[in-house]
Image (spheres, grey):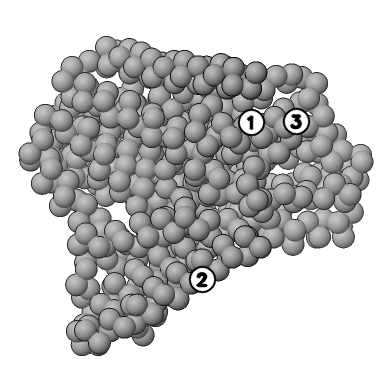
Amino acid sequence: MHRTKRNFVPFILTIAAIVGILMTTAFAEGEAEYVSNFFSMPLSLLPPVLAIALALITKEVYTSLFLGCLVGGFLYANFNPVMGVTSTFDTLVESVGGNVALLAFLVMLGVIVVLMNRSGGSKAYGDWAKKHIKTKRGALLATMVLAIVLGVDDYFNNLTTGNVMRPVTDSHNISRAKLAYMIDSTAAPVCIMMPISSWAAAVAGVADTMEGVSGLQLFISAIPWNYYAILTLFTLVILAVFDEDFGPMKIHEDNAKKGDLYTTPERPFEGADDESKNSTKGKVADLVIPVIALIICCVSGLLYTGGFFTSDSDYFMDVMGAFADCSAPTGLMYGSFLALLFAFIFYMVRRTMNFAQFTDCIAEGFKVMVPAILILCFAWTISGVTNGLLGAKFFVADAMGAVASNFANFLPAVIFLVAVGLGFATGTSWGTFGILIPIVVSTFGVDAGTILTIGIAACLAGAVCGDHCSPISDTTILASTGAQCFHLNHVKTQLPYALTVAAVAFVNYIIAGLIQNVIVNLIIAFASMFIVLMALRATLGKDKVNARAAAK
């Protein structure tokens, strides 16, 4: 009954908001007005903020995201109802059309995952893992290691790591929220520090457009100053080793120890794997070999779209150049298609399934990915409305320029905060550093030396942090999908960890702007993060003692 009532909340909010907007049309300017009065204004950030707030309050992701898109369309149209609706759907079509390759990759990966389950490979791997990975600590660290190995692309990383490690973490009663946090907080931080990755290519591509700047060299020099990424990985290790949690994550982990991996009533992936249809002939190889094939095919696809196989110059530079020029969604689409063909032949030869069972997995794999696809489509639309139609990126750039002129000594820390805010509002790391890197370079100057490197690192770190905190981030959505965790559970449980690391990173960017010594600053960063985590652990330990005393 309570659940039914709650389901009406976003619907009522939606209707009330739309009615309120339509009532304002009487005060709007003429229908011929095509330049929004809200372009590059503070209200240009309203669509994502509204969508995020409603999603967290109502737990209805799809309705909240669509309402954010619609409000953005009406702001763009200066409250003209017809133009507001048409501009919203035009942006939806354009956003989805530009990401068809990624959607195809998701569907094919979903099919491969279902195939691995139906072949019995996932169960066989889970049984093997129970014998060889005997502790919760081992399962968490193994998840982190696999995510680091797959650090070439965050989309691929989140989905593959989640699907491979899910049977292992389930066997050790690790909540789906904790699994989602582990893979999400390893994927992007590793990618943003991996010279051979799609992220390095994106950063280098933006920086290379500016005269006198070597994008790849700037990216590599910024790695040891990327405090959010470094300290996030450090935090993952500490939390795994000491088996400590705080905030909402602790509730999820306590419930997982009792056998409830989801905690909340919202558990869209529960029962997704119908073991009655799975083969009893499955071996560990039925999971491991297709996964290895998937990795090889996807990396090859990325290199192919970057022109690697048509080049005949120096091998290392060929690889770097190919990643710099690659199209990640297209490469992953090609790679997943080849991996799917391989899986088909492999399972047929192994006789773990017949042709009819294989074709049944195609439809099932698509259904598994529908929640992620819906959220991604709305998230892309909000980003398109916010930046494309309402010009929020120009508002943020102007605000940053004003702040920079007043707080020049603390500019790296300011850049970090601005990147966090923009990444959170738009849900995109790439869009954030794509907007801010030219501003950072022009603010410091190409000959600024170390302080420019710190500023670029702060920009990249803030972009990843904002991405981690945002419910409309594509990588956050894919982490939830890979872990088969209710999306808002992942967002709520990850947020305290992300904000804790962000606070320590912010302080260290203030210190870095003053000291500018990479070794000294890294030591300070690790020490400060460790002290904060140990302080939290001491507080948690005290709470446990008090709880036991109260129970007696």
Image x and y of residue 426, in percent: 36, 53
For disc 1, the neighbor class at 10 Å (few under 14, some 14 to 19, many from 20) is some
Dot 3 and dot 1 residues touching (CB under 8 Å):
no
The quadrant holding residue 103 is bottom right
For disc 2, the neighbor class at 10 Å (few under 14, some 14 to 19, many from 20) is some
* Secondary element at image label 1: helix
| Residue at screen point 69% across, 60% down | 367
Q: Nearer the viewer, mark 2 or mark 3?
A: 2
- Separation (CA) of disc 2 from disc 1: 33 Å
Q: Nearer the viewer, residue 387 or 328?
A: 387
Residue where numbered disc 3 is placed: 171
If you read the primary sequence from the N terminus, does the residue marked by circle 2 or circle 1 appear first? Answer: 2
Question: Does residue 276 lie above or below 89 as drawn?
Answer: above
Look at the image and tell me whether residue 537 can be seen. no
Question: Does residue 49 lie above or below 120 as drawn?
Answer: below
| Residue at screen point 78% across, 56% down | 361
Residue where numbered disc 1 is placed: 254
Q: Nearer the viewer, residue 353 or 418?
A: 418
| Residue at screen point 27% across, 66% down | 390
If you read the primary sequence from the N terminus, does the residue marked by circle 3 or circle 1 appear first? Answer: 3
Q: Is 361 placed left or right of 197 in the picture?
A: right
Q: Nearer the viewer, residue 337 or 79?
A: 79
Quarter of the image that includes the N terminus: bottom right
- Separation (CA) of disc 3 from disc 1: 15 Å
